[in-house]
Image (cartoon, rainbow, N blue to C red):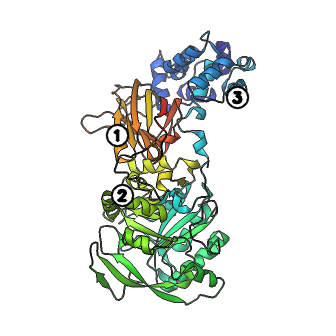
């Protein structure tokens, strides 16, 4: 039956004789088999017996079987097929329950799967599945390692904003380095498309009373503030419905701050949040309440009630001075260095009572811009004690990575209690002129909501960022675990938890298929290995790796099992990295995939791979078997 179906699908292509490589590749795609051209080319060359650049129908059949009839899939199929030719409905149900952990499976659902993936009509009508149907099902999105339920917004979005991790970018306008590189609208567009919900805009006075955006005191190119806002307006809610925060690094004079306010209001209209949602707020609103809203993060004059009372009044020319505290620390970047040529500090006074040192400055703020700041007032972080006494619920702080890391090492529990109450943004230090990134995991571990990364720079930190925010439908908002929201928490990421719900995660890494070849190979070869890296609290961080399979990027088989005992699974991410061994120059990166441990599907699963730049490498993937066991049921 399979033979008859197969011939009926390909016979027309061979009526005029042999076919070449291009037609072979197209015919495989017609059969719903995803193929990498580089691998098809190599297999075609091996099966072209006369070396004429054309193959017969039998040679095509051989190529098809090499690509699709993978031994590891055949073994699974044969285990559940009584006759090794067909799966009956009850066989498929048994496989889906026992191996894929789909516990609510029944014959009706199984037949829906058969209808979707079985290509042979007679088999489909008999409520059966051939191996052809089985390989198509196993290669489908239904068998991905990432849980489909996590691919939609499933978390409770009615908590206050400070209860969420929020996808955040740093110097969003830059697309390369911090000193000479171009500023580009693509920085904002690409970040928003990736689900980023907090964008940074460095604003400076421009000519003809038009504010500009660029990295001040550098040779980076300049953008008009107006065009940045127009681009954000166009793409803000393309990927996610939830609020976007514009973190203004504002160096503009009051007159150009008024221009900024006018631009924000005219471009965003009703989507710009410019008033409180409740009469007497004492906590931040939720992402749900702020759907399709733009929030401005900037310095602010006065209280929310005073802002509300001024609603609708003419604020043109109204400028007030506010006293701002700035840390004297040049290692953290422009956000730690106050003022600008347009907004110079006055009455500078060094506060020397303890370290770090702070300086007071008078800053001029246009009332028109100040009144657009509602729930995200920018306030300099001074100490946890100061925040406990004086910080208001709508005030948020930005802390440089160096200072944040010191606080994390010395006062982690206090840091957790601080981020429970107030939105805290972490940004890269100024010495990262190449736009490199820190590891965001250490700051997520203490509940920091906005861990801002240079989205334009590929590598491990952005892999973790992309992996973490796959969850909850890629909405850019992820509800923090209960122990990072409960004000009675004893959680400290630097210490083993007294009570937890540890998970034993077992991954059998079975094989790879159509992996990217090494750049040093003239064909489709690579000396492949896989590194499994676990990120989370310090006690959970570990990595393990497979042996090397020599000269095989097409179908390496490892069949190795790895076990991880994870104390805090709620914060853990798993990163699969495929490399080609190179003993002289160091291993070559071929592809990776990162996802939250709690978003991992159990059973036989396909791990898709992405390039260093974050592009899909389909059909390259790993084939794994995942088992997760929760050891006990306690709370922090």
Residue 461 is marked as none
Q: Secondary structure at mark 2?
A: helix
Residue 103 appearing in the image:
yes
- Of mark 2 and mark 1, the one earlier in the sequence is 2
Looking at the image, do the residues carrying marks 2 and 1 touch, with CB atoms under 8 Å apart?
no
Taking depth in this image into account, of 517 and 465 the one nearest to the observer is 465
Q: Secondary structure of the magenta portion, mostly?
A: loop
Q: Quadrant of residue 528?
A: top left
Q: Which residue is mark 1?
A: 542
Q: Secondary structure at mark 1?
A: strand
What's the residue at 56%, 67% (across, down)? 284
Residue 519 rendering spot, x and y as whole percentages: 37, 37
The residue carrying pointer 3 sits among few (fewer than 14), some (14 to 19) or many (20 or more) residues within 10 Å by Cα, namely few
Residue 124 rendering spot, x and y as whole percentages: 72, 20
In this rendering, is residue 222 above or below 18?
below
In this rendering, is residue 325 above or below 173?
below
Taking depth in this image into account, of 300 and 220 the one nearest to the observer is 300
Q: CA distance from mark 2 to mark 1?
A: 21 Å
Q: Is residue 382 left or right of residue 481?
A: left
Q: Which residue is mark 2?
A: 412
Taking depth in this image into account, of 138 and 485 the one nearest to the observer is 485
The residue carrying pointer 1 sits among few (fewer than 14), some (14 to 19) or many (20 or more) residues within 10 Å by Cα, namely some
Residue 176 appearing in the image:
no
Q: Nearer the viewer, mark 2 or mark 3?
A: 2
Q: Is 230 within the magenta?
A: no
What's the residue at 65%, 72% (across, down)? 278
- Of mark 3 and mark 1, the one earlier in the sequence is 3
Residue 109 is marked as 3
Residue 585 rendering spot, x and y as whole percentages: 26, 39
Looking at the image, do the residues carrying marks 3 and 1 touch, with CB atoms under 8 Å apart?
no
- Residue interval drawn in magenta: 281-288
């Amino acid at each position: 039956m399979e033979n008859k179906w197969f011939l009926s699908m390909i016979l027309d292509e061979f009526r005029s004789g042999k076919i070449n490589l291009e037609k072979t590749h197209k015919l495989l795609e017609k059969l719903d088999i995803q193929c990498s051209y580089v691998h098809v080319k190599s297999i075609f060359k091996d099966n072209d017996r006369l070396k004429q650049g054309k193959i017969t129908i039998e040679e095509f059949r051989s190529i098809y079987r090499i690509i699709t009839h993978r031994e590891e899939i055949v073994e699974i199929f044969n285990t559940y097929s009584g006759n090794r030719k067909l799966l009956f409905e009850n066989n498929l149900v048994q496989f889906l329950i026992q191996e894929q952990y789909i516990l609510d499976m029944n014959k009706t659902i199984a037949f829906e799967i058969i209808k979707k993936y079985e290509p042979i009509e007679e088999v489909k009508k008999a409520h059966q599945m051939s191996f052809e149907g089985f390989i198509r099902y196993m290669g489908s999105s239904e068998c991905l390692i990432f849980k489909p339920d996590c691919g939609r917004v499933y978390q409770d979005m009615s908590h206050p904003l400070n209860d969420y991790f929020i996808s955040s970018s740093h110097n969003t306008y830059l697309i390369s380095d911090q000193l000479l590189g171009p500023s580009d609208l693509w920085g904002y567009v690409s970040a928003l498309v990736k689900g980023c919900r907090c964008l940074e805009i460095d604003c400076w006075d421009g000519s003809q009373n038009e504010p500009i955006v660029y990295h001040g005191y550098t040779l980076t190119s300049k953008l008009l503030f107006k065009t940045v806002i127009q681009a954000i307006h166009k793409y803000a809610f393309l990927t996610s419905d939830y609020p976007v925060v514009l973190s203004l690094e504002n160096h503009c004079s009051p007159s150009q701050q008024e221009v900024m306010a006018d631009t924000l209001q005219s471009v965003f209209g009703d989507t710009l949040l410019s008033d409180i949602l409740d009469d007497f707020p004492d906590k931040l609103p939720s992402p749900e309440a702020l759907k399709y809203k733009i929030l401005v993060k900037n310095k602010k004059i006065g209280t929310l009630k005073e802002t509300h009372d001024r609603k609708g009044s003419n604020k043109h020319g109204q400028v007030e001075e506010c006293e701002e505290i700035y840390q004297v620390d040049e290692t953290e970047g422009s956000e730690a260095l106050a003022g600008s040529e347009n907004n110079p500090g006055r009455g500078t006074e060094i506060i020397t009572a303890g370290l770090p040192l702070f300086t007071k400055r008078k800053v001029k703020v246009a009332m028109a811009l100040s009144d657009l700041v509602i729930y995200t007032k920018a306030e300099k972080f001074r100490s946890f004690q100061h925040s406990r006494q004086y910080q208001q619920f709508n005030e948020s702080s930005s802390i440089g990575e160096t200072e944040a890391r010191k606080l994390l090492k010395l006062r982690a529990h206090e840091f957790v209690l601080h981020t429970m109450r107030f939105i805290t943004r972490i940004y890269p230090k100024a010495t990262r002129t190449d736009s490199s990134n820190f590891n965001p995991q250490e700051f997520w571990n203490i509940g920091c909501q906005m861990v801002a990364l240079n989205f334009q720079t590929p590598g491990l930190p952005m892999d973790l960022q992309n992996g973490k925010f796959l969850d909850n439908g890629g909405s850019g908002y992820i509800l923090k675990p209960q122990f990072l929201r409960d004000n009675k928490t004893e959680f400290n990421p630097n210490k083993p938890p007294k009570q937890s719900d540890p998970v034993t995660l077992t991954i059998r890494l079975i094989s790879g298929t159509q992996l990217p070849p090494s750049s040093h190979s003239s064909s489709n070869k690579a000396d492949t290995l896989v590194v499994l890296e676990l990120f989370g609290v310090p006690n959970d961080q570990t990595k393990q790796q497979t042996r090397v399979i020599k000269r095989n990027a097409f179908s390496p088989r490892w069949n190795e099992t790895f076990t991880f005992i994870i104390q805090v699974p709620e914060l853990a991410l798993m990163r699969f990295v495929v490399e080609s061994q190179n003993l002289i120059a160091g291993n070559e990166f071929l592809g990776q995939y990162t996802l939250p441990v709690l978003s991992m599907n159990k059973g036989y699963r396909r791990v898709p791979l992405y390039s260093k730049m974050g592009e899909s490498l389909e059909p390259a993937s790993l084939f794994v078997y995942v088992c997760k066991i929760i050891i006990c049921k306690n709370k922090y």
